[in-house]
Image (cartoon, rainbow, N blue to C red):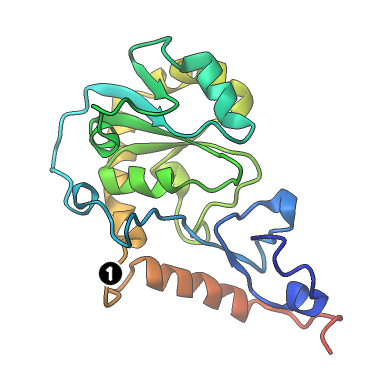
Amino acid sequence: GPHASQGNSLLYNNSIRVLCNANISEGFNPQKDVSLPEISLIGGYLSPKLIHPPPNASRPYFAFFAGGLHGPIRPYLLQHWKGRDNDMQVYEYLPKNKDYYSYMLESKFCLCPSGYEVASPRIVEAIYSGCVPVILSENYVLPFSDVLRWEAFSVQVETTKIPRLKEILSAIPEEKYRKLQEGVIVVRRHFMLNQPPKRFDVFHMILHSIWVRRINARPNSNRS
């Protein structure tokens, strides 16, 4: 994504690019470009389990991750946590008798490591399921960070601290955890897809992000 417009310098320097892979190390410019939340739409639809999650569901699992082993961060995560601690439900791929979204709905923390790209659909899936996202990424500009305080509904952990992940998450007081989860519930509507769009949903949040950058735009010397 960040490289797609580099072949045209006028476009690259003067357009507002809306990208899932909002990676500042690959040319994403937070002042000019928009970070697009990555949403997994299997067959064009969200899972019914995520659209209508059960209220006040019990969360017997402390932390959960399952996913493909690609990029530099996930192998490091699995190296330290796969099959090592029952509290840390970390898998490469789930066994066929396990359900991915059920794990999310039953976990306190959902681990969201980058893969080949900095963005991960797990962040939005965690928000849908009421699970506090734990963001394990580098150089990632989080979506809608102009208006959303991500620290109020997620936990960001430096990738170098993955070996201490359980210690870091366990140190979060129960009261703070409850506030984080309440924050997840509050921001959920800003990441929802609706047809037609509804006020404050993901469609309007994206437009707002573009609008903010448009009114803050300054003439570029490369503009012809």
User: Residue at image x 50%, y 57%?
Assistant: 143
The residue lying furthest to the front in this view is 96
Q: Position of residue 155 (x, y in %)?
A: 45, 35
Measuring 21% from the left and 54% from the top, which residue is drawn there? 51
Horizontal and vertical percent position of residue 102: 23, 35
Is 16 situated above or below 64?
below
Task: Give the structural element (helix, strand or loop) at label 1.
Answer: loop
In the picture, measured across the screen, residue 217 lies left or right of residue 18, that is right
In this view of the protein, can residue 52 be seen by the observer? yes
Image quarter where the C terminus lies is bottom right
Q: Residue at x 28, y 52 (%)?
A: 186
Total numbered badges shown on the rendered structure: 1
Image quadrant in which you'd find residue 154: top left
Name above or below for residue 6 compared with residue 222: above
Q: Is residue 119 above or below residue 32?
A: above
Residue holding disc 1: 194
